[in-house]
């Protein structure tokens, strides 16, 4: 692989790759605002300027500049190298690039920061971006100067509603145009544009339009400052109080990689952010997926219950044992869930084997909207995984048909969702003599069950999911289990013991040892059995003077 030198270190690169991209792949950041690896490079912020040393036999490209000489009390002419934007310059074999080691580059970065902050409001205490703002970070790294401009800054519109999800603050905007380019190049809806010039620049929405659709949250995500905020997260939490878990979106079969941000002080999830994975979702998520974090709290099953009342887990397990006592195995079915993890479904598969049941079915949420960007019509995170766990598995409609015929009288199910009309399915399930459901969320299966056991959601337990492409992915535990919920594989082990059976698993590693051999790639390649939430973000930087 060809290489070039950046600040004296060898950097490998792919042909046609820009300097900033190649350096970023090595885990080092060249300061930038407008550049994003998933978007075109306009080179309009000038923060990524670097010095490129001339090759042997070539003349250096220089500029004539005037510097103030305090001793002489006058300006003096001198030459300095012409700096190049690292986002637009392609790397070349043997190239020598200077960044932090160049005094000219340091001066340029400091000057760009001063220029961007001339009219920028110092409203960091009330800005949602505070604590994860590039202006704050870069001011500490490349600024730390005394502000020289004493004039009244230019004032622009604030708290402008761009649509149902996004609020715009023009005074904070650095005109990087990331939001414009995202809507044009990725969402394919060029609804945003730039108007006016110079100090009067601001982002605007096309006349007669709103910023709407399925990817509006990404405009806030790509914004490097606090100009765009989501109405959902706005003023709800401070980022330095949040912790992060590496999660997998449960909204559809795409299985977008995400950061689940939560506050451990109140055990509450506050937002999803895309986690880069070029195999799956690249750098993006859809609005529906970004908002699905709230399913960690909404529609949850949190306590064990029977048809009559909420009760203790021990008590309802005794009731389950009575319901299944002496029941012929030919009349017992198990229903897997496309919304639960591989671990949960593998535990149910073994329970079916212990029961001697060969009636295997699966339930899933019904199909919905899809597009050619990210959104899959399958609104379940683990449909492929269920088929890997149990070959020859049958649909939920076939399960209902056997219930109607009387062949199936007793069932144990995972999850609450069914693939048809929830109300109609709940009525048909009443024909069962006994239904035990282990679920994280309410649905037709929990509504109809004689026994319901609370399971943790994906946010409360580490789990493995297989997306539509067959890629196996691990979602880490974030918040602590709520109510009396426990991982479904644990509840199924307790249920097996209550039925007089002896499960072979008691720990997560024992269940994971039973997972089927993956048919696709694995991401991450070697996931830990359980992982704590990530470290807190850095403390907020001091605002620029």
Image (cartoon, rainbow, N blue to C red):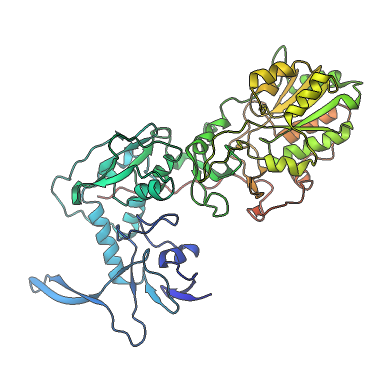
Does residue 36 lie above or below 104 as drawn? above
Query: In the picture, which quadrant includes the N terminus?
Result: bottom right
Relative to the observer, which residue lies in front, 528 or 186?
A: 186
- Give the residue furthest to the left: 73
Total labels: the figure holds 0
* Rendered location of residue 166, percent (x, y): 37, 36
Residue 484 visible at all:
yes
- Is 293 left or right of 159, judged from the image as shown? right
Which residue is located at x 26 percent, y 59 percent? Answer: 112
Does residue 22 lie above or below 220 as drawn? below
- Is 362 left or right of 252, judged from the image as shown? right
> Which picture quadrant has residue 344?
top right
- Is 350 left or right of 294, judged from the image as shown? right
* Rendered location of residue 244, percent (x, y): 53, 43
- Give the residue furthest to the top: 308
Does residue 236 lie above or below 322 as drawn? below
Does residue 511 lie above or below 363 as drawn? below
* Rendered location of residue 240, percent (x, y): 44, 42
Relative to the observer, which residue lies in front, 73 or 334?
A: 334
Which residue is located at x 80 percent, y 42 percent? Answer: 391
Residue 27 visible at all:
no
Relative to the observer, which residue lies in front, 4 or 404?
A: 404
- Give the residue furthest to the bottom: 57
* Rendered location of residue 111, percent (x, y): 24, 61
């Amino acid at each position: 692989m060809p290489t070039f030198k950046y600040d004296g270190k060898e950097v490998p690169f792919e042909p046609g790759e820009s300097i900033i991209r190649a350096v970023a792949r090595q885990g080092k950041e060249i300061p930038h605002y407008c550049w994003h690896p998933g978007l075109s490079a306009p080179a309009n912020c000038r923060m990524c300027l670097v010095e490129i040393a001339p090759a042997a036999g070539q003349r250096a490209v220089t500029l004539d500049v005037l510097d103030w000489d305090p001793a002489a009390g006058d300006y003096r002419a001198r030459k300095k190298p012409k700096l190049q934007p690292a986002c637009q310059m392609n790397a070349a074999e043997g190239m020598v690039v200077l960044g932090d080691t160049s005094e000219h580059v340091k001066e340029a970065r400091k000057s760009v920061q001063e220029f961007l902050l001339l009219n920028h409001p110092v409203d960091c205490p009330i800005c949602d971006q505070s604590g994860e703002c590039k202006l704050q970070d870069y001011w500490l790294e490349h600024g730390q100067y005394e502000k020289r401009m004493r004039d009244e800054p230019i004032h622009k519109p604030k708290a402008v509603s761009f649509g149902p999800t996004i609020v715009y603050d023009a005074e904070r905007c650095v005109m990087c145009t990331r939001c414009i380019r995202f809507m044009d190049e990725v969402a394919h809806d060029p609804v945003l544009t730039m108007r006016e010039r110079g100090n009067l620049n601001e982002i605007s929405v096309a006349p007669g339009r709103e910023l709407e659709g399925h990817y509006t949250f990404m405009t806030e995500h790509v914004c490097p400052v606090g100009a765009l905020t989501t109405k959902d997260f706005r003023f709800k939490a401070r980022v330095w109080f949040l912790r992060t878990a590496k999660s997998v979106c449960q909204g559809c079969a795409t299985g977008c990689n995400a950061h689940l941000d939560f506050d451990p002080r109140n055990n509450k999830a506050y937002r999803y952010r895309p986690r880069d994975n070029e195999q799956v979702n690249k750098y993006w998520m859809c609005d529906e997926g970004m908002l699905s974090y709230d399913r960690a709290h909404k529609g949850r099953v949190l306590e064990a219950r029977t048809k009559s009342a909420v009760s203790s887990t021990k008590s309802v397990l005794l009731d389950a044992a009575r319901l299944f006592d002496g029941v012929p195995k030919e009349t017992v079915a198990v229903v897997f869930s496309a919304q639960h993890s591989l671990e949960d479904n593998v535990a149910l598969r073994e329970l079916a084997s212990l029961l001697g049941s060969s009636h295997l079915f699966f339930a899933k949420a019904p199909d919905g909207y899809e597009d050619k960007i990210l959104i899959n019509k399958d609104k379940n995170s683990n449909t492929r995984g269920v088929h890997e766990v149990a070959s020859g598995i049958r649909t939920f409609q076939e399960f209902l048909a056997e219930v109607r015929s009387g062949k199936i009288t007793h069932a144990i199910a995972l999850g609450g969702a069914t693939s048809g009309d929830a109300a109609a399915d709940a009525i048909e399930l009443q024909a069962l003599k006994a239904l035990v459901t282990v679920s994280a969320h309410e649905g037709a299966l929990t509504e109809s069950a004689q026994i319901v056991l609370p399971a943790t959601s994906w946010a409360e337990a580490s789990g493995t999911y297989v997306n539509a492409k067959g890629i196996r992915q691990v979602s880490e535990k974030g918040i602590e289990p709520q109510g009396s919920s426990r991982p479904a594989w644990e509840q199924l082990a307790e249920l097996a013991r209550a039925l007089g059976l002896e499960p072979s698993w008691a720990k997560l590693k024992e269940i994971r040892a039973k997972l089927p051999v993956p048919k696709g790639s694995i991401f991450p390649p070697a996931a830990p059995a359980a992982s704590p939430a990530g470290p807190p973000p850095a403390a907020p930087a001091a605002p620029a003077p």
